[in-house]
Image (cartoon, rainbow, N blue to C red):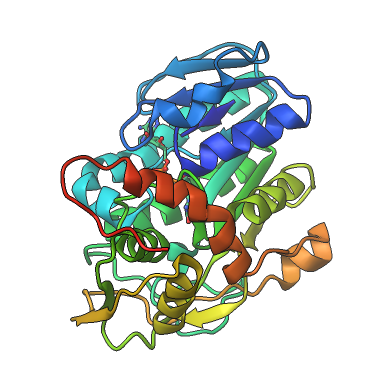
Amino acid sequence: MVTGAAGFLGSHLCDALLAEGHSVIAVDNLLTGNLRNLAHLKRETRFSFLEQDICSPFDPGTTDYIFDFASPASPVDYMEHGIETLQVGSIGVFNLLELARKHRATFFLASTSECYGDPLEHPQKETYWGHVNPVGPRSVYDESKRFAEAATTAYRRYHKLDVRIVRIFNTYGPRLQMNDGRVISNFMKQALRGEDLTVYGDGSQTRSFCYVSDEVEGILRLAWSKAQEPTNIGNPGEFTILECAKEVLAVTKSKSGIQYLPLPQDDPKQRRPDITKARTLLGWEPKIDLRQGLELSLDYFRTEVESEPSVTHHVAG
Ligand SMILES: NC(=O)c1ccc[n+]([C@@H]2O[C@H](COP(=O)([O-])OP(=O)(O)OC[C@H]3O[C@@H](n4cnc5c(N)ncnc54)[C@H](O)[C@@H]3O)[C@@H](O)[C@H]2O)c1
């Protein structure tokens, strides 16, 4: 079972599980996801879809593995749906943990690098406890995920449930929401529309970006391993936001400029995974660098921009 299956990562995970020969029950309430992401699986006999909010108890039948990818994930979405975000990481996760217990299934939690907050340690290892503002605007997401990790670990500790926790770092690729407010989608969209790229602050804050096929491969390696503790999966290649903007301009061959705006509150200044654990434990590391990943994503973003209604865009390239 994959929850959040109609979203960006969940849908790619469904594809990868089906490609490995598994059967998949996909669950989503379509809060931020879109059935378009699963349309290509309509005729797949090993695939079924259930429209369901995981915050209400449910049981779609026997399952041996629950992948929980249900949660608003982008800052735009979790700030708009703050309460739902807190609920899905608490009530929703409890419901799934109980389901996993009932079916003796393994529970896999999609957690996040946001657990590290605005980190004081760089790069971030799994042993770092984080630096999170519990009442800041991002806290609905950060604390929801930290709680979800605590709940997952408690079920392991008290009920001997078999669990995995992945801390996902910024991931991008086809099916990423266009209006998610994250760096790559913003820049690609703006570049392809011929608009200036918006950089918050002076652009010297850094991010790491993992291409979706690398991320999903890491997730599956972790899933089939015995590692019960949180594990970082992300690309350690670090770019300043300004460098990222320049990569996007090069790949899209866009003539857009750069517009600077003030830095939002609690925006992390640095974020980069230490993937030593994933390397040694899972033999995993990302293969696709930012330039290649942007090239692989270009067709998707171009199609999305070209299908936008109304406004006339100056499409580059
Ligand atoms: N994309 C990233 O870079 C990234 C980074 C860190 C963590 N994650 C985590 O990975 C998971 C998937 O993220 P994504 O980028 O694919 O986001 P997404 O918004 O594309 O997908 C999330 C999906 O969850 C569904 N959902 C939300 N609340 C639900 C509920 N109560 N019941 C059922 N379904 C619900 C949404 O409709 C959506 O389809 C999330 O848990 C997110 O926190 C993603």
Work out whether 195 lies above or below 80. Answer: below
Residue 178: x and y in percent read: 34, 49
Quadrant location of the N terminus? top right
- Left or right: 315 in relation to 223: left
Describe residue 87's horizontal placement relative to residue 61 as left or right: left
Residue 278 place in picture, x, y as percent = 74, 63
Report the quarter where the C terminus lies.
bottom left
Q: Position of residue 146 (x, y in %)?
A: 44, 56
Q: Is residue 144 visible?
A: yes
> What residue is rendered at 36% in x and 66% in y?
187
The front one of 238 and 317 is 317
Q: Quadrant of ligand 1?
A: top left
Considering only vertical position in the picture, is 209 above or below 175?
Answer: below
Q: Is residue 120 above or below residue 89?
A: below
Q: Is residue 151 above or below residue 253?
A: above
Q: Nearer the viewer, residue 52 or 106?
A: 52
Location of residue 246 (image quadrant): bottom left
Q: Is residue 109 left or right of residue 134?
A: right
Q: Is residue 72 visible?
A: no
Residue at 61% over, 77% down: 237
Marker count (numbered): 0
The residue under the point 36% across, 70% down is 132
Quarter-of-image position of residue 308: top left
